[in-house]
């Protein structure tokens, strides 16, 4: 499939390329919403994006229907997926969503896309502390691609640090629950117990 290169386009990227070492198994398979989270996010993002891809490690088993986009850089962390997306299509904007934040939903993405500032490198929310950017749930504008690559070539790989040093629009978080992330089996058990679910 060839990438769309329309400058006003918005593509989705599920950030699911981590090793899930603390969880012990692929976090994208956890069923927060009665289906694997990577499938849930694919559906939610598809309502806002012309295409959706799933960032993953080269050896990951991701169904073709989820449009896997294997990491192309030697980086441990989500910067790999973001850079890979811009390498795949540098002319589009990318709406990224991490696979370990279960409260991401259409309402949150609607706010993000409605408040999008195309003149900034990115639009995102403040993190749970309310003072820095939450970089993984964000719209990255096409102009961010080369800047991120230059940032990486200086030996830097933190998207949060990148947003702290570049012009980004940062929105007030619509809900403190939005920032919950599930990275370990202890986190997962606590989440499922609170929701009355089994996993």
Image: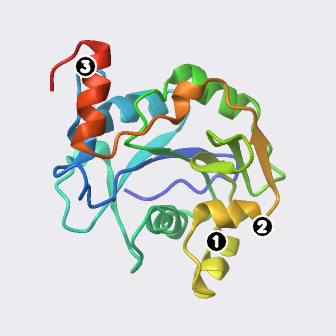
Q: Please, is residue 127 above or below residue 109 in the view?
A: below
Looking at the rendered image, the quarter that the C terminus falls into is top left
Q: Is residue 192 left or right of residue 8?
A: left
In three-dimensional space, the C-alpha distance between marks 3 and 2, rounded to whole angstroms, equals: 40 Å
In three-dimensional space, the C-alpha distance between marks 3 and 1, rounded to whole angstroms, equals: 39 Å
Q: State the residue at coordinates (63%, 60%).
A: 160
- Neighbours of disc 1 within 10 Å: few (<14), some (14-19), many (20+): many
Say if residue 32 shows up in the picture.
no
Mark 3: secondary structure: helix
| Badge count | 3
Residue holding disc 3: 193
Return the x and y of residue 42 as percentages of the image width and height: 38, 35
In three-dimensional space, the C-alpha distance between marks 1 and 2, rounded to whole angstroms, equals: 11 Å
Return the x and y of residue 194 as percentages of the image width and height: 32, 17
Residue 174 in which image quadrant: top right
Select label 3 or label 1 by which is in front: 3
Q: Please, is residue 37 above or below residue 16 in the view?
A: above
Q: Indicate which disc, 3 or 1, sits on the residue closer to the N terminus.
A: 1
Return the x and y of residue 139 as percentages of the image width and height: 64, 46
- Neighbours of disc 2 within 10 Å: few (<14), some (14-19), many (20+): few
Q: State the residue at coordinates (46%, 61%).
A: 78
Residue holding disc 1: 148
Mark 1: secondary structure: helix
Residue holding disc 2: 165
Q: State the residue at coordinates (26%, 55%).
A: 20
Q: Are marks 1 and 2 in contact (CB under 8 Å)?
A: no
Q: State the residue at coordinates (38%, 43%).
A: 99
Q: Indicate which disc, 1 or 2, sits on the residue closer to the N terminus.
A: 1
Say if residue 158 shows up in the picture.
yes
């Amino acid at each position: 499939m060839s990438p769309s290169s329309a400058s006003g386009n918005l593509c989705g990227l599920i950030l699911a390329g981590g090793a899930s070492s603390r969880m012990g198994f692929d976090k994208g398979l956890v069923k927060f919403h009665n289906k694997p989270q990577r499938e849930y996010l694919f559906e939610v993002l598809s309502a806002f994006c012309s295409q959706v891809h799933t960032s993953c490690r080269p050896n990951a088993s991701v169904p073709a229907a989820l449009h896997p986009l294997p990491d192309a850089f030697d980086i441990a962390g989500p910067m790999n997926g973001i850079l890979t997306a811009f390498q795949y299509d540098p002319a589009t904007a990318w709406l990224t969503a991490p696979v370990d934040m279960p409260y991401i939903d259409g309402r949150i993405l609607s706010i993000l896309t409605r408040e999008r500032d195309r003149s900034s490198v990115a639009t995102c929310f403040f993190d749970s502390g309310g003072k820095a950017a939450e970089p993984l749930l964000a719209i990255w504008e096409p102009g961010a691609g080369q800047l991120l690559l230059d940032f990486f070539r200086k030996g830097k790989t933190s998207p949060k640090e990148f947003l702290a040093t570049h012009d980004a629009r940062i929105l007030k978080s619509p809900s403190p629950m939005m920032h919950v992330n599930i990275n370990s089996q202890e986190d997962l058990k606590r989440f499922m117990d609170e929701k009355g679910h089994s996993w």
